[in-house]
Amino acid sequence: MKFTIDSKKPSAKLYCHSKAVSRGLWLICFLTIYVTGFAQGGVTGKVQSAVDASPLSGATVHVVGGRANTLTQSDGGFVIQAKQGDSLLITMIGYLSKTVLVTESSIGIIRLQEVENDLSNVIVVGYGTQKKVNLTGAVTTVDMTKKEGQPITNASNALHGVPGLFVNLSNSQPGVDRATIRIRGIGTLNDNDPLVLVDGIEYDFNELNPNDIASVTVLKDASAAIYGSRAGNGVILVTTKSGRGKSKINYNFYQGTQKATYLPDAIWDPIAYMKLKNQALINEGKDAVDYSDAEIAEYEAGMKTDPITYPSSNWFDIALGHGRIQKHDVSVSGSSDKASYRLSLGVLDRNGIMFGPGNHEKKYSLGLNTSFHVTKRLTVGMTLDGYYRNYTTPFYTSFWSYLMRALPILTDTLSDGRYGNSWMRTPGRNNWENPRMIAYTGYGHKTVQRFVATVFANYKLPFDITYNVKYGVDKYDGLLEQFTPQVKTWNPKDPTAFINWNSPSTAPRSSNTDYNNLNLHFYQTLDWDKNFDKHHLTLMVGTSYDNFETKNFDASMTGYLDATLTALDAGTERYATGGNSTRDVLISYFGRVNYDYDGKYLLEGIIRTDGSSRFADGRRWGAFPGISAGWRLDKENFFPWKNTINLAKLRLSYGKVGNQAVPLYSYENSINLGRNYSFGGQLASGAAATAYTDPTITWETTTNYNLGLDLEMLNHRLTFSADIYKKGLRIFCVQ
């Protein structure tokens, strides 16, 4: 009997030169052919995303214990030299690694689960991440990927409905819409805004492009103590999106209109208004009324023939209409085993609902997030978030207040286009605020550019220690240009009579204000993570340095012939000049320890020490501790509802946080110039201390107590969380 294997052809062939071959021998021959064949041709397979089955290119396939490596192609496919019994390790940034056993020449499709700081598993916390099941503090997360496609122009809109969070966007005027955010109410007489950190660096939440945000974490109790002196009002942590998987381009677009959804139920019938105003005065016990019966009768008759002199002005209909909004977002992202990247561009173009030119904003945003695995131990990267925007406002920015004071007897414009007032004498309206005049005369134009850039590195040291360092620069530049002509309102009954709405001595007037802010941030940490059988211990220590600098300059000129030339040098008289600069420094040392036993008993301790230049020597340093514990009831043997309740956790926390939001240099006696005084009939230049200062002013400290319960039921489809808390202000600063 003779066997010959021909391996020169793609598929091996076996020639058996014997007529007496048993079935068992043929089976041995077949197995020999099979093993030999795929060992020489290589093992094939495809790697896909477990979410949408899209192919993953750039994933690394490695033979465990060997030297063979390869990368997946654009279709996710790969070929690697391996033999039966080998194990293949498939890795890719942003995905969980997976090991598969080689049993045949094609191992089929391998699906990788995304990591992406999965909010169902991992939560971003101060200077790191934690498993959600191991959290012991009152922490709420918002997964922004679930809000994609929603018409969100301000990132704060995405926070509505978050437990313990109050969000109010009281002004939607383009360019100046800023949300008020409060975490668990008002806790101080000073600044109540929470600390907002974007990828670890302080930034304005309102300025973020919502399309660039991956997740938002809100720290509400002792968990915020890791940020010490600035955490008195809670902390919001924002994580921006990064590249995941195969290279792809995403484009989002929406266009819509805006209108006022609710307006006060005002009376715009002039006759009804005058009669009801008189009745209100009579009800107050006043003897005199504002409008006589003769005036009301004349007005009612005149409305039929002269709507300019006897108007019936519904100022909500006149001043408010539909606003237009358009938003474009495009991003390019991807990752491989060695690098990940995401670059995004956004454009927002919108007009508000009020009339006039001072009602428009155009904003361009830029986002960049990259990381590179230089070696197995070293990872470096950088992020960039910024915007360039310009917007217009009326010169007199209190348009909405003036609109709410408008009356139905106020004439809009005369027949020749001049701004009207009213011939009806009305107490408190000696200088009529015509909303059209406010909206159309003069202008305010602001141009702003702001960018925050960070570079970071992570290095894995021996003994399971990781060193993390990040440096960030936040640069803000703004220019506000304003101009107002000298404006008048005219009596519709006597077109030669007018009222100077602004003083000829101060208008026409042009002003420019220049803003230059530079903030520098640096922090570094050492992390240690170790398992001892059922014991799990993590330690983190770190330092940070924050430097805030502001420089502002403003100048105003008068003496303009008209509104044709509005530049500063077109004026003939200097009206005012001013400027200031400030510097504020914060140095911090902090640490955190986490321990859990078998994922059942959880404990966390936090300490932070801050030194602030806002206080005098000897009072600049403060310590802010925090401690919390958790108990996973569902892991206990006595827990009776294991089949229904997937997670049941009790939480208890105590911590102290601070607030340094007092005016700069408030511990120093300040002297204000320009306090002139008359001596002997001559005006002399003077200066004076106009405010009391407290050299002993120090930290504001808030103590938080929290008791919470977390439940997840029905295979994690139903979640429940409840907290009882007490928030007490022990030392407060008033200035």
Image: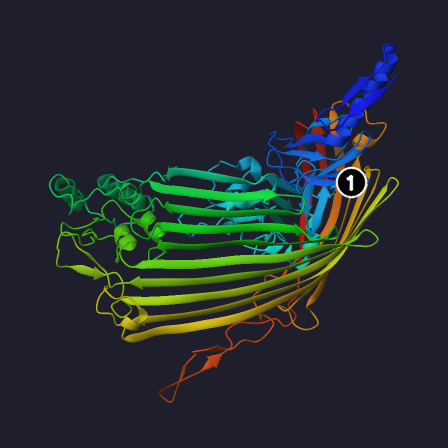
Give the mark count.
Answer: 1
User: For numbered disc 1, what is the local secondary structure?
Assistant: strand
Q: Residue furthest bottom?
A: 680
| Residue at horizontal 54 percent and vertical 70 percent from the top | 582
Judge whether residue 642 can be spotted in this image: no
Query: From the viewer's perspective, is 651 left or right of 734?
Result: right
Q: Looking at the image, which is closer to me, 324 or 558? A: 324
Q: Position of residue 435 (x, y in %)?
A: 28, 51
| Residue at horizontal 36 percent and vertical 46 percent from the top | 352
Q: Position of residue 347 (x, y in %)?
A: 43, 47
Assign the N terminus to one quadrant of the image: top right
Above or below: residue 713 compared with residue 669: above
**Residue named by callout 1:** 630
Please tell me in which quadrant of the rendered image residue 438 appears.
Answer: bottom left
Q: Looking at the image, which is closer to me, 638 or 304? A: 638
Above or below: residue 5 compared with residue 624: above
| Label 1: few (<14), some (14–19) or many (≥20) C-alpha neighbours in 10 Å | many
Above or below: residue 73 compared with residue 356: above
Please tell me in which quadrant of the rendered image residue 547 appears.
Answer: bottom right
Assign the C terminus to one quadrant of the image: bottom right
Q: Position of residue 442 (x, y in %)?
A: 29, 59
Q: Looking at the image, which is closer to me, 322 or 264? A: 322
Please tell me in which quadrant of the rendered image residue 264 appears.
Answer: top left
Identity of the amino acid at label 1? Gly
Query: From the viewer's perspective, is 349 left or right of 218?
Result: left
Q: Looking at the image, which is closer to me, 96 or 197? A: 96
